[in-house]
Image (spheres, helix red, strand yellow):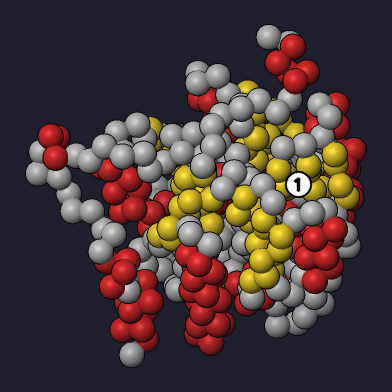
Amino acid sequence: MLRAAIKKRLFPPSAIKKLVPPPRSLSSVATEKVVCSWNEWDPLEEVILGLADGSAVPPLHPAEQAKIFHLPNTLAASGPREVAKIEAAAAELDNFGAILEAHGVTVRRPRVEPNVGFTTPHFRTETANGWSCPRDVITVVGSEVIEAPTPWRSRNFEITAYRDVLMEYFIRDPDMLWTSAPFPALRDELFRDAYAETAATRAEQMAKREFVTKDWVEPTFDAADIIRCGRDVFVLHGHTCNLAGFKWIERTLGRRGIRAHLLHMPSVLNPSHIDASIMPLKPGLLLAAPNVVEDVGIFKDNGWEVVPCVEPTDWYTTDPAYKGKSGKWIAMNVLPLGPDTVAVMEHDEPMAKQLQSLGQKVVRVPFRNVVEFGGALHCCTMDIRRKGECESYFPLLDEQL
């Protein structure tokens, strides 16, 4: 029954019609523009939406522990998630997909992979993480799809769930570039020894940029460490993105004229994924967590209005049943559907009201159950196509050329 329900949900008749069979020859490859997304706010046309099925609370490997050190319920809950929670989250994700489609957005889903433990030459993990957050492992800059080298051992092969849909895009779109960062070995020497045991000195470590991942062993980053603003992208230096990872991003995008900027947010004690600290809503308007406003001077200097986010409702760290990876600032993880429309989690009413006061049309989405699986509306989608061109929104940076 459950497998049949999953199949029906993931592959309804309307979705099956959209699948493209493999070409018989190069001459039969279609030529259409499918992949093109330069920023976080242009009108949204197509997304990949994650799945809750098969999700687990990840094993306590070094990078995972660094992310959730302040969430004792999650630390104690490693293993497959409860069936009832998976079904509740899956229903909310399906509903979000229907909301996106009602707004004219094409919605694609990854495949359900078996969540089994695996062994590499350098480590073993009892389970994989899951497939709820495509933005953690994939980013799109223009026509280029980039696969991220996540330092989470439980996510070492997570990208394979997206390969079918990415291959389809590659067949359909002759301009699509498909780039994979160096596959991470994730040996023990990448991680600082006993880092989780140093939580008492975390503020001091953040000031010195001593994160769980060392900088020059191999490149690592999550795709969610990147925020795209046209010709400029902003990358968070933290537990998931090390300096080697940033340099890889900078050099790879620099060949196409894209400028990459490394941001440091010392007041964030578990820095990982920039989209829970800042979110550009449209050109010239940045929403920022109050504790990082001083860390985004590059926006202010270039004429952007930086608006401190309202204090979110914090049930994440107080509900004993919550076994997620995020704290209250995940409320900032909204998804712009266009420069004046934004999807917001329904339970985050303070956020919805603040965005309305900023002139945004708010689309409320029930999502409380999904958050526990690793992210909110932005994390659980990856925009494949937005209607717009590559532009510069930072005039002072243009003057430096």
Instruction: Name above or below for residue 226 compared with residue 22.
Output: above
Which residue reaches farthest left? 24
Q: Residue at x 65, y 40 (%)?
A: 227
Q: Secondary structure at mark 1?
A: strand
Where does the image place residue 71, in percent across and percent down from the top left?
75, 68
Which residue reaches farthest bottom? 1
Q: Residue at x 38, y 33 (%)?
A: 177
Quarter of the image containing the C terminus? Answer: top right
Where does the image place residue 307, in percent across and percent down from the top left?
86, 47
Instruction: Name above or below for residue 183 compared with residue 277.
Output: above
Compare residues 165 and 34 and report the one nearer the observer. 34
**How dense is the environment of label 1, judged by Cα within 10 Å: few (below 14), some, or many (20 and up)?**
many
In the displayed structure, does residue 18 sit left or right of residue 73?
left
Q: Quadrant of residue 223?
A: top right
Whether residue 399 is visible to the viewer of this picture, yes or no, is yes
In the displayed structure, does residue 368 sit left or right of residue 113?
right
In the displayed structure, does residue 262 sit left or right of residue 310?
left
In the displayed structure, does residue 354 sit left or right of residue 75?
right
Whether residue 119 is visible to the viewer of this picture, yes or no, is no
Compare residues 153 and 369 and report the one nearer the observer. 369
Q: Residue at x 28, y 43 (%)?
A: 172
Where does the image place residue 363, in percent across and percent down from the top left?
66, 66
For mark 1, what is the residue? 278
Q: Amino acid at mark 1?
A: Ile
Where does the image place residue 89, in percent across and percent down from the top left?
55, 77
Instruction: Name above or below for residue 54 compared with residue 207.
Output: below
Q: Quadrant of residue 362?
A: bottom right
Q: Residue at x 30, y 54 (%)?
A: 164
